Image (cartoon, helix red, strand yellow):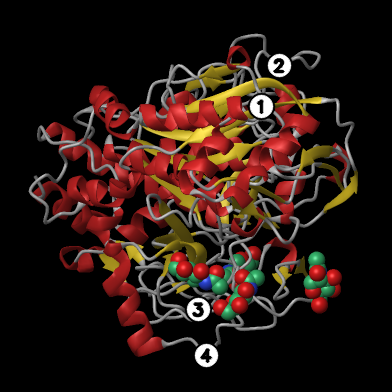
Amino acid sequence: MFAVAFALLTGLTLVLSSPSRSIHEQRTNLPHGWSRIRRPDLSGTLPLRIALKQSNIDKLHDRLLDVSHPESENYGKHWTLEEVKTYFQPSEDSVEVAMQWLEESGVERARIEISKGRNWVQVKDLSVAEAERILSTEYHIYEHIHGGTRLACSAYSVPSHVQPHIELITPTLHFDGPPPSKRGHLSARSFKAVDIAPLDSATDDLSNCDVRTTPPCYRALYNIPAEPTILAASKNSFAIVEYTPQAYIGSDLDLFFANFSPSLVGRRPEFISIDGGVVQTEEMDFEVNIESNFDIGYAMTLVGPGQPVRLYQLEDIPEGSAQLLGPFNDLLDALDGSYCTEDGGDDPSVDGVYPDPAPGGYQGPKDCGNKQKSNVFSVSYANNEGDLTPFYQIRQCNEYGKLGLMGITFLFASGDSGVAGNNELCLFPNGTQSVDAPLFNRSFRFSQLLYYFRLTCTTAMFPANCPFVTGVGATQVNPGSTVFDPESAASLTGGGFSNIFALPDYQKSAIEEFYKFHKPPYGADQYNNSQKARGIPDFSVNGVNCTVVAEGLTIAVAGTSAAPPVIGAMITLINDARLAAGKSPVGFINPAIYSDAFRDAFNDITSGNNPGCGTNGFEGVQGWDPVSGLGTPAFEKMRDLWLGLP
Ligand SMILES: *[C@@H]1O[C@H](CO)[C@@H](O)[C@H](O)[C@H]1NC(C)=O
Ligand SMILES: *[C@@H]1O[C@H](CO)[C@@H](O)[C@H](O)[C@H]1NC(C)=O
Ligand SMILES: *[C@@H]1O[C@H](CO)[C@@H](O)[C@H](O)[C@H]1NC(C)=O
Ligand SMILES: *[C@@H]1O[C@H](CO)[C@@H](O)[C@H](O)[C@H]1NC(C)=O
C-alpha cells in the first residue's frame, strides 16, 4: 500500500515493486570462531525488534559536556531520569513510520507491539521467511568452534524513508556475548597469574612494590589516604559489577582484609542481584574467583570501612555458565527502564531471557529500570570493537552518555594484550582476525578469553572505546624501582584508536598534541591514524604484579582489570568530599580530566609501550598517549581540584 503511494507521489513507477531501500547494517567478516553452516527452517519464527531512533540523540555529546565540563556554568547540574527519558524518547512520528512499514509489509497491526518506553517496536512471532522479505535479507545458522549456534544474517536493508527513524533491528547480525562454551575450555588467563607466593607479614612494606603491588603500594603511588575520613556515606555509592559465574569467596576476602584492612574482616559488599545473579560457590577456581576477589577486596580496602561498597552481580547460573549473553545490555536495562523493552529483554538470541526457561533458571522477570543506580560503576569486563556492529555499540554508548547526564561515572578496563587482541589476535585488512595478521588498526578487539569465561581485563575495546565512559589502563613499577620512582606503561595495556567512535571534543587538544610531537611510525594500513578517532585509555593505575588472594593462596596477577576498582575507589572518595560539601557527584569525568586545570592531577607516564601484531605498539610519551592515557592520578590534587568545582 505505502509503496504504491510512495511511487505515485514521486512519480517513480519503476520503484513500484522495489521502493528505494538502504542497507542499514552489514558485516563483511564474522567474529573470530564463528562460521555459517546452513539455511534455517524458513517457517521457524523469530522475535523481530526494531529499536527506534531516539530524539535529540545528536545533542547528547553537547548536553553531556554542558554538565561535566569544568568551565561550563551548568557543571554538576545533572539531569533526572525523567528529564533524560523525555528528552531522548523516540518521536511518535518514528513509532508511526515503523508500524506503517511493518503493516505495509503484510504484518497485521494486531501482531505489532510497542514497548512501554515507546522505544522498541516488535513482532513477537514472525516467520523467518517474513523477516527475510521485510529486511531483504537471508538468514543463516552460524556455529561457533566451541559449540553453540545463532540465527543471523550478514546485512539487512530498510526502505530509505524508514532508515532515519531506526537505530537497529534484531536479531540480525549481532554476535554480542560469547557463544555457549564448554567449561572444559577454560583457559588459565584472566588477570594473568604471574606468580604464586605466600603473603609475607610485612604488608605495609613499600620496598617490594615492583614485585608485589598491595593496597599500601597504591596509596603510596597515588597519595591515597590510608584511613580515609568518610563524611557522606549515606548519600554516596560505589558499585562493582561482576558476571556469573565470576564470584568472590568470602574466606579469601577475609585473608586479604586481615593483611590490609583488619577492620573489614567479616564485611561483605551490599549485594544487588540483576536477572537472578548469584555469588555461586558450585564452581571455585582461580579463573572464576580472581576477578571478583580482586575488585571487591581493593574497592573495600581503599575506600575503607566507612563507605559500603555494592556488588551488582549479573545473570543467573544457567545464563552465566552458558555464557550466552550480551552482558552490557542487561546492566543498562536494569538501570534505565527507558532503555529496555520493558517486556522481556533485548535480543533473546544474544541477551539473557528471563524468566529463564533453562533448568534451575531464575524465575523472576527480567530486571528493567528497577535497580538502584550508584554514583560510580567499576566494570572490568569488555568486548571486542571489531566483533560488534557500529550501531550496536553506538546505541549502548549513548546509554552510558545518558547515565552520565544523570551524574554517574562508568569505568571500564582498556584491555590486556597491547595493540593486539587477546591471544595475540591481529587483523588482516579484510577484517579477519588471526595470530598472523599484520594490522592493528582495529586494535579494539575481542579477547579470546571472553570466549571461555567472559572475564576481565580483556583487550581494548568496547565499551572503553565509547567516548562517554572512562577507559582505564595499567602501569607498572619498574623492576628494581620503588613507588617513589616514575612508573612505566605496562606492556599488556590495551590502547589505540577506535574505528567507530569519533574524537570527542574533550580529547581534541590532547590528541592534537600527541600527533604534533609524537606521531607514531605506523601507516593507515596499521591503525586508524585519521587523528579524528577516539583514543584510549583515558588514564591508568598500576596493574602488574598485583596481590590478590584466591583459593586461600596469594597470587600476583596482571591486567587492566585492576584499574576500574582502584580508580573507582578514588572517585568514590572524591564524591564523598563533594557530597559532604553539598555538591553533586563528579559524574562523567572525562571533560574535567582532559581540561588544562587538571594537568597537575596526573603523573605523566613517559616510558613503556604496548607491543603486538609484530610491532612495538605505541610508546608512553610526554602528555596523553595511547598506552597510559593521561598518566596516573595524583589523588589529593585531583580531589582538591574537584572540590573547587561547583
Ligand atoms: C613482577 O614480579 C616478578 C617476580 O615475581 C619480577 O620478575 C618482575 O620483574 C616484576 N615486574 C614486572 C614488571 O614484571
Ligand atoms: C582475509 O584475508 C586473509 C589473508 O589474506 C585470508 O586468509 C582470509 O581467508 C580472508 N577472509 C575473508 C573472509 O575474505
Ligand atoms: C585499516 O585501515 C585502512 C586505511 O585506513 C582501511 O582501508 C582498512 O579498511 C582498515 N582495516 C580494518 C580492518 O579496519
Ligand atoms: C577512523 O576513525 C574515524 C573517526 O571515527 C572514522 O570516520 C573512520 O572511518 C575510521 N577509519 C577506519 C579505517 O575505520
Q: Which mark is residue 521?
A: 4
Which image quarter holds the C terminus? top left
Label 2 or label 3, whichever lies nearer to me, is 2
Confirm or deny contact between disc 2 and disc 4 (CB under 8 A): no
Residue 149 in the image: above or below residue 279 = below
Circle 2 residues within 10 Å: few <14, some 14–19, many ≥20: many
Query: What residue sits 59% from the left and 73% below the top?
Result: 441
Q: Position of residue 294 (x, y in %)?
A: 55, 43
Amino acid type indicated by mark 4: Pro
Residue identified by numbered label 2: 356
Residue identified by numbered label 1: 352
Residue identified by numbered label 3: 608
Q: Which quadrant of the frame does ligand 2 lie within?
A: bottom right
Amino acid type indicated by mark 1: Gly
Secondary element at image label 3: loop
Q: CA distance from mark 2 to mark 1?
A: 8 Å
Secondary element at image label 4: loop
Q: CA distance from mark 2 to mark 3?
A: 47 Å
Amino acid type indicated by mark 2: Asp
Q: Position of residue 70 (x, y in %)?
A: 15, 54
How many numbered markers are drawn? 4
Q: Position of residue 600 (x, y in %)?
A: 20, 68
Point out the tag, 3 or 4, that comes first from the N-terminus.
4
Residue 591 in the image: above or below residue 316 = below
Q: Position of residue 286 (x, y in %)?
A: 72, 42
Confirm or deny contact between disc 2 and disc 1 (CB under 8 A): yes
Point out the tag, 1 or 4, that comes first from the N-terminus.
1
